[in-house]
């Protein structure tokens, strides 16, 4: 099976979460889990960074190494291409 673009996967999980939420009184348990999955997936979607402005756009911490792949604090994936 081909892998989905991250944004499409997030959209599908959100739809699934909302359907559970509407129809099941116990949905809070699966909703919490799906929200965690969505947060983890969002961090896999690279955000643009530059060494001239070397802080994580998500958590604002300083990026320690040029071209590090992920934020050491929040786990956000970085895109160093201009
Ligand atoms: Zn960060």
Image (cartoon, rainbow, N blue to C red):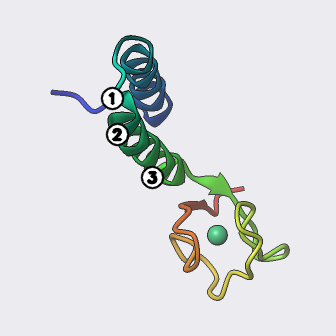
Residue 33 position in % (x across, y down): 36, 44
Q: Earlier in the sequence, mark 3 or mark 2?
A: 2
Distance between mark 3 and mark 1 Cα atoms: 23 Å
Q: Relative to 66, is 10 above or below?
A: above
Q: Name the residue tied to disc 1.
A: 26
Residue at image x 41%, y 25%? 17
Q: Is residue 66 above or below residue 48?
A: below
Horizontal and vertical percent position of residue 28: 41, 35
Q: State how far apart marks 3 and 2 are (Cα).
A: 17 Å
The residue that mark 2 highlights is: 29
Quadrant of the image occupied by residue 12: top left
Task: Give the SS element for disc 2.
Answer: helix
Residue farthest front in this picture: 25
Numbered disc in front, either 2 or 1: 1
Q: In front here: 35 or 64?
A: 35
Q: Position of residue 74 (x, y in %)?
A: 57, 70
Question: Residues at badges 3 and 1 in contact (C-beta under 8 Å)?
Answer: no
The span from disc 2 to disc 1 (Cα, nearest Å) is 6 Å
Instruction: Report the number of numbered marks.
Output: 3
Q: Residue placed at 34% from the left, 39% from the top?
A: 29
Disc number for residue 40: 3
User: In the structure shown, which secondary structural element does the residue marked by tag 1 occupy?
Assistant: loop
Image quarter for ligand 1 = bottom right
Taking the spot 55% from the left edge, 77% from the top edge, the residue there is 68
Front-lying residue, 14 or 5:
14
| Mark 3 or mark 1, earlier in chain | 1
């Amino acid at each position: 099976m081909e892998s989905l673009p991250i944004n499409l996967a997030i959209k599908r999980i959100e739809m699934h979460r909302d359907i559970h939420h509407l129809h099941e009184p116990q949905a809070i348990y699966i909703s919490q889990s799906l929200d965690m999955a969505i947060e983890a997936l969002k961090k896999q979607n690279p955000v643009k960074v530059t060494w001239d402005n070397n802080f994580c756009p998500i958590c604002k911490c300083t990026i320690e190494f040029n071209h590090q792949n992920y934020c050491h604090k929040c786990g956000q994936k970085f895109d160093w291409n201009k």
